[in-house]
Image: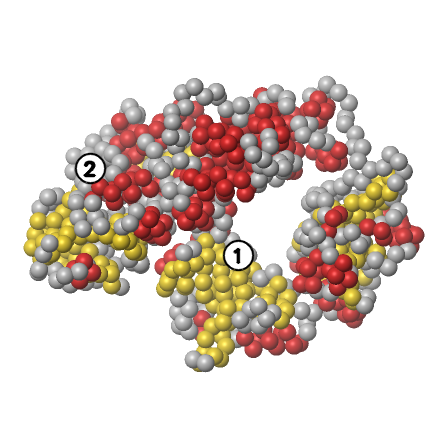
Amino acid sequence: MNRFAELLDRLAYEPGRNNKLRLISNYFRATEDPDRGYALAALTGALSFKHAKPGLIRDLIADRTDPVLFALSYDYVGDLSETVALMWPKASLPLHNNPPPPPLADVVTTLRTLGKTELPKQLARWLDELDETGRWALLKLVTGAMRIGISARLAKTAAAALGDKDPHDIELMWPGLTPPYLDLFAWLEGRSEKPVNLDPAPFRPVMLAHAIEDTDFANLDAADFVAEWKWDGIRAQAVSGRDEHGHILTRLYSRSGEDITRSFPDLLPSLHLPGAIDGELLVLRDQRVQTFNVLQQRLNRKVVSPKLIKDYPIHLRVYDLLGEGDTDLRDLPFAERRARLEAFVKKLDDPRVDLSPTIAFDSWDALRSARADPASAGAGEAAEAVEGVMLKRRDALYLPGRPKGQWWKWKRDPHIIDAVLMYAQRGHGKRSSYYSDYTFGVWASGDNGEQLVPVGKAYFGFTDEELLQIDRFVRRNTTEKFGPVRHVVHEPDQGLVLEVAFEGLARSPRHKSGVAMRFPRISRLRWDKKPGEADRLETLERMLKSDISL
Amino acid sequence: MRPQDILMPVPAGLCCKPGGFHIDPVRPVERAVITHGHSDHARPGHGAVLATQETLDMMRLRYGDNFAGSTQPIGYGEAIKLGDVTVKFHPAGHVLGSAQIAVACKDIRIVASGDYKDAPDPTCVPFEVVPCDVFITEATFGLPVFRHGDAADEVNKLLASVALFPERAHLVGAYSLGKAQRVIALLRAAGYDAPIYLHGAMEKITRYYQSRGVALGELRMVKGIKKADLAGTITLAPPSATSDVWTRRFPDPVTAFASGWMRVRARARQRGVELPLVISDHADWDGLTATIDATGAGEIWVTHGQEDALVHWCQAKGLAARPLDLVGYGDEDEGETPAAEDAEVSASGNTEA
């Protein structure tokens, strides 16, 4: 446990990717099975405990500290594990005869097997014995959210380095592996054969696109690419395979590999042929794609009621085929996969699964016009759910991650307004204690004349340098404080104008202004403008009416 | 007479009407009584200033000779009559010359403690508990997650890192007034006797500490030293400089930061700190609560920092407590403004921690 705590602690302060890799690889090399396997599981988010949950930690600390002081501390620190590790009161009795903290594998096994009633006592005993770093690491393990800047991919890459293997190979076999990964480490150290994935419906790591910049086009030939609409839905992978009894088993995965099958039982019967499809979850009513706001009703549902299924009929719009039957298609060029996909969808012959159409274009300019006006470029009424176009190289293999130059996303230009910073709130995690969440408003005529009405909240889009500038501005121009929220001066001649970019606008009775922005972010700081020059609510209302695919 | 008739918060700062002065005013006033030399508490442009000799000297160093219409030095334990009140200075243990100001009127005594710490510091006179009816406390580290521990252990961490990386330079971010000199003194106390290097912005104030008899050993300015010669050395710099192009003159520097904020990981990471050193010139949570207890005050006014938590703690103990909502003081940890090499000690509204 101590060694694992030390690893996490060093990783938390190490900014460089290569140094992080080195730290993790060194740990794997110096640590025995099964400890290192559980560490890999912890770093990749593969551990979960039935009873050891964040709620349990909250209960433990609630028994030992004042709830208000805890809440204020948590708000400040921005991380549950760290708050509890720092606040945990010193044990009242001296701990001379206590054994040293157990190995990581023992901790994990205990957390997994101990009953609900004994668990709190055991956790508290460990927390009493460990130092701050140890407590922090233990709590990270329990909450499952490491938040130390290590992605699962990075941890797997570090494991691969142990045996000079390609991390991609680990990705492919990963869904079939379970902690503490004895077979994986045996293979990495050359002691056994490569593990095989026996899952009949495994997740395939998804391929992602780069955002394209205007300057990129000069080096790209339109003839090398296929274009499709970029749908404003949820990326999903639908996999069907035959289990050992020959029955079809179907699973839906999010783009990160999370199993989301249970949220969409209504879609499963449509996926009756063995294969692995890459596509977009959308809600369709009368053949018409609904906006993301509507789709949101179907997300993150544990229980799916018949009414929900009826009111929000789910649909899969497909754009790639990664496997068919037992054949892996990922090593085929995109154009060939597309042809197989078209045949596959025809064979499925199901109204809930349809093909994402390609866009005909012969030059970048032609595509630019299509992107500006999807409705008349073939998207028709579905244009409302189009958020841009995707470009895929005809010869691109299906590669996990974000390989350079293969797939591009070309989003529609965002809408932009100038708004005034009204309130600021401290952020969490990496930005805890910085004022990084901003509520902004535009001018409207009210009972007391001209006044600002809040129209949205944004907490990204700015650079680290700009964050410092806004943070400083907030601190120096606070007019009132309410806990973590600060009122920032916003008068016609005093205050900060933020240029806000957003993807869409919807009417919202929940907002005072009556409108809700989709995906708002700070695109620029307008130090050069006075708040009096910021936009008015009427501008937003006009945008709503003009129906520019909002 | 009620306590709030003696001292009350106004936009300019804490105002003592019966005494005709403000404590640590943030705007120019006729008469200012100043607790210590940090720039958010000691500002230029007042008519008359009453403070310790050290605080007056620091203001002169930063703002020049004409920083106030007139000045009057006062020593610890000295009392002076101003209008209807008696003002007495007591050591605050925060930085050299820092003071708590006891204001007595009739049978009520209020202590405005400014910034303070109850932890040992070889560079200044130790904090003194002053019994009072109303205690005005800061709350910079007013959350129970802040427990600072022994500063000597943190300095040992730094020395261990220096021993581990003899080919790299160690850059320690530390506020120019107080923290830097304390870190140097702690290094000397730990037996480190090699020359310690300074960023130009720290020279004047550090030399001033030496002139007041604070032993800091051999100090050198880092400017003009060859890169290779800085391997294995320790340099102190304003926190903002440690993430500046200025650091390019050092061989593969390890970035440390000496601050109470380093107790929270996210704070260290935000600043790109590799070696966080929890060394604070403010009282930690245990220090704040123990001090409040020790003063015997029945009423607590909480100024800048994490007021809510400390007010809540006081109220739970049955003490009357309220936040003063003063604006303009060392609010949380806004860093010092970047100071160019050889620049004057920065004069803008900074704070330290």
Q: For mark 2, name the chain.
A: B
Instruction: Judge by depth and name the residue closer to the eye, A466 or B83.
Output: B83
Task: Count neighbours of disc 1 (C-alpha within 10 A) and say few if under 14, some if 14 to 19, many if 20 or more.
Answer: some
Q: Residue at x 76, y 27 (%)?
A: A195
Question: Looking at the rendering, which quadrant does residue A230 occupy?
Answer: bottom right
* Place of residue B18 in the rendered image (x, y in percent of width and height, measured from the top left): 12, 62
Instruction: Judge by depth and name the residue closer to the eye, A143 or B177.
Output: A143
* Local secondary structure at mark 1: loop
C-beta proximity under 8 Å, tags 2 and 1: no
* Place of residue B188 in the rendered image (x, y in percent of width and height, measured from the top left): 27, 28
Is there any visible trace of residue A510 in the rendered image?
Answer: yes
Three-letter code, disc 1 = Tyr
Q: Residue at x 58, y 35 (%)?
A: A116
Question: Looking at the rendering, which quadrant does residue A416 occupy?
Answer: bottom right
Q: Residue at x 41, y 27 (%)?
A: B161
Is there any visible trace of residue B247 in the rendered image?
Answer: no
Q: For mark 1, name the chain.
A: A
For disc 1, the marked residue is A459
Task: Count neighbours of disc 2 (C-alpha within 10 A) and say few if under 14, some if 14 to 19, many if 20 or more.
Answer: many
For disc 2, the marked residue is B126
* Place of residue A443 in the rendered image (x, y in percent of width and height, measured from the top left): 49, 75
Three-letter code, disc 2 = Pro
Q: Which mark, residue B298?
A: none
- Give the CA separation, mark 2 to mark 1: 44 Å
* Local secondary structure at mark 2: loop
Number of marks in picture:
2
Q: With A240 as the anchor, is B153 left or right in this view?
A: left
